[in-house]
């Protein structure tokens, strides 16, 4: 059974969790493949709101097994707390969470180093989530990380390993003017997490290979977004992992050929949290209105998100990088009250017109977006069926499809699980044929 992959098409916060939640109804496994506690995935079920950070959002479906893949960097103490928080709310997680032995640990010194780097950068800060993500991936690349597999060592050996790492990192903390950590205390915390996590740790690759071989359905869940990808994003204003489709093979151990359906998630407008170039950002009233109507405040940090119009140049570039087969468009209802909506269809740099998102963030800084203005629909769309959507809303969806050259198969019209319309699959034109 081929694997479905869900990836963020913008700068994260596209509403991936809601789409994953929708698709997870029909799957056996939901797998995270990169990132860590920097992610914030919100799912609304009736009056209840769930915010997931490290556990895949598929956990709300009792028959789904959730896998935290080897490409992740996992904060073990935060993971234990997150699992406890889910259990308290009545979700039975027994036997349903697996943690890859290849995943790396985010240690307390990683969090301190992340915060310190941000404070030092001052004006040039990246605006990280301060969850220790970059230092943890840096240790992985330096081959100095601690992996989940290390939690399987005897308590005495693990204690020594952790204490050694803390002592090494204390040198850096001290050099940067920070208080060193107690090796004993950190080791105690990791040993406590070990007791809880050990039953969940496994080589998850054969689990997934076997699942695929016997026709079980696997859904991989990207965190962050393609424009935050370490290679393809607006470097250095990016996260430290491969959020794009390529990262899913690396971060799960599934071969690239397994991924048959690659669903890109895009908001009907754009948002970005943290610093870095954002060509279609609206700093005035429009941005404010999008933020308030879309409740654009971070799930992980509570920060206000920067908001702007849909950027089709960035979107079509991301379609190509990921090889997206179809798109889920979220939060279309946020545009319901606008008399007109704008879409950026090209960039200009001097006399040149660009239809590809530049590879260098400095070039992205200097582009001038070219917009088309389209009529709004001024009608509520939440709760409507696809055939009852206002004509201008349908035109907007069709126009985005043509600008990015990828069919839109799902449209989300509100935070509720039920506020979703499916556009029948088929040859183009997909909608309103
Ligand atoms: P880090 O991943 O915490 O190192 O942050 C690097 C950049 O990615 C910052 O601009 C963050 O705001 C952004 N970022 C990280 N995770 C997310 C996310 O889940 N949603 C949106 N932005 C994120």
Image (spheres, grey):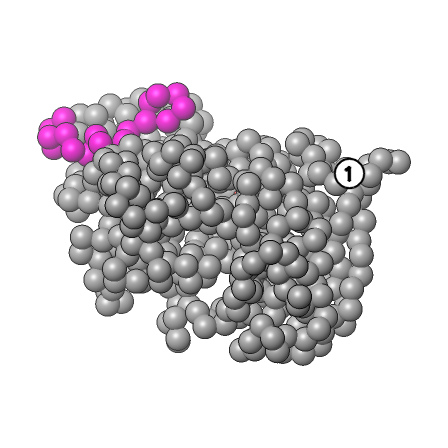
Give percent across and percent down for residue 245. 48, 39
In the image, farthest residue toward the front: 427
Q: Is 218 above or below relative to 335?
A: above
Q: Which residue is mark 1?
A: 354
Would residue 285 appear left or right of 425 to someone viewing this image? right
Q: Which one is in front, 188 or 308?
A: 308
Q: What is the tally of numbered marks visible in this picture?
A: 1
Give percent across and percent down for residue 415. 49, 69
Q: Is 135 above or below relative to 223?
A: above
Instruction: Specify whether residue 240 is painted magenta.
Output: no
Q: Which one is in front, 296 or 216?
A: 216
SS category of the residue bearing label 1? strand
Instruction: Specify whether residue 145 is painted magenta.
Output: yes
In the image, farthest residue toward the right: 351
Q: Is 395 above or below relative to 194?
A: below
Picture quarter with the C terminus: bottom right
Q: Is mark 1 within 8 Å of ligand 1?
A: no
Q: Which one is in front, 59 or 111?
A: 59
Q: Is 415 above or below relative to 405?
A: below
**Where, by quadrant of the figure, is residue 152 drawn?**
top left
Q: Residue 320: in sight, yes or no?
A: yes
Magenta-drawn segment: 140-157
Give percent across and percent down for residue 73. 36, 37
Residue drawn 38% across and 50% down? 219
**Where, by quadrant of the figure, is residue 285 drawn?**
bottom right
Residue drawn 17% across and 25% down? 160
Residue drawn 75% across and 59% down? 342
Residue drawn 54% across and 48% down? 325
């Amino acid at each position: 059974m081929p694997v479905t992959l869900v990836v963020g098409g913008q700068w994260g916060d596209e509403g991936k969790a809601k789409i994953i939640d929708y698709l997870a109804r029909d799957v056996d496994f939901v797998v995270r493949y990169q990132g860590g506690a920097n992610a914030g995935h919100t799912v609304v079920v009736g009056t209840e709101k769930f915010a997931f950070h490290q556990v895949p959002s598929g956990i709300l479906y009792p028959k789904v097994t959730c896998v935290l893949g080897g490409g992740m960097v996992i904060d073990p103490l935060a993971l234990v707390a997150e699992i406890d928080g889910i259990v308290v709310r009545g979700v039975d997680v027994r036997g349903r969470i697996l943690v890859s032995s290849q995943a790396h640990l985010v240690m307390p010194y990683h969090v301190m180093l992340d915060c310190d780097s941000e404070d030092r950068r001052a004006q040039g800060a990246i605006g990280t989530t301060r969850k220790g993500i970059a230092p943890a991936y840096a240790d992985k690349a330096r081959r100095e990380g601690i992996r989940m597999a290390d939690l399987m060592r005897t308590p005495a050996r693990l204690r020594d390993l952790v204490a050694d790492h803390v002592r090494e990192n204390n040198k850096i903390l001290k050099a940067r003017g920070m208080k060193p950590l107690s090796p004993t205390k950190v080791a105690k915390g990791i040993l406590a997490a070990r007791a809880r996590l050990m039953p969940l740790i496994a080589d998850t690759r054969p689990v997934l290979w076997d699942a695929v071989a016997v026709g079980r359905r696997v859904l991989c869940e990207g965190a962050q977004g393609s424009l935050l990808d370490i290679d393809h994003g607006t470097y250095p204003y990016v996260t430290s992992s491969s959020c794009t489709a390529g990262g899913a093979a690396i971060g799960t151990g599934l071969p690239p050929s397994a991924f048959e359906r690659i669903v890109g998630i895009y908001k009907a407008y754009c948002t970005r949290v943290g610093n870095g170039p954002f060509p279609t950002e609206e700093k005035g009233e429009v941005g404010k209105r999008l933020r308030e109507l879309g409740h654009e405040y971070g799930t992980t940090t509570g920060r206000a998100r920067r908001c702007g119009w849909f950027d089709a140049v960035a979107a079509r570039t991301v379609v190509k990088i990921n090889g997206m087969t179809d798109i889920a468009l979220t939060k279309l209802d946020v545009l319901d009250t606008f008399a007109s909506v704008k879409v950026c269809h090209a960039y200009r740099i001097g006399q040149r017109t660009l239809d590809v998102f530049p590879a260098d963030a400095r070039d992205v800084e200097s582009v001038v977006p070219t917009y088309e203005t389209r009529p709004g629909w001024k009608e509520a769309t939440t709760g409507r069926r696809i055939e009852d959507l206002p004509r201008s809303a349908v035109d907007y969806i069709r126009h985005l499809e043509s600008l990015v050259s990828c069919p839109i198969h799902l449209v989300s019209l509100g935070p509720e699980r039920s506020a979703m319309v499916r556009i029948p699959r088929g040859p183009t034109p997909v909608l309103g044929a």
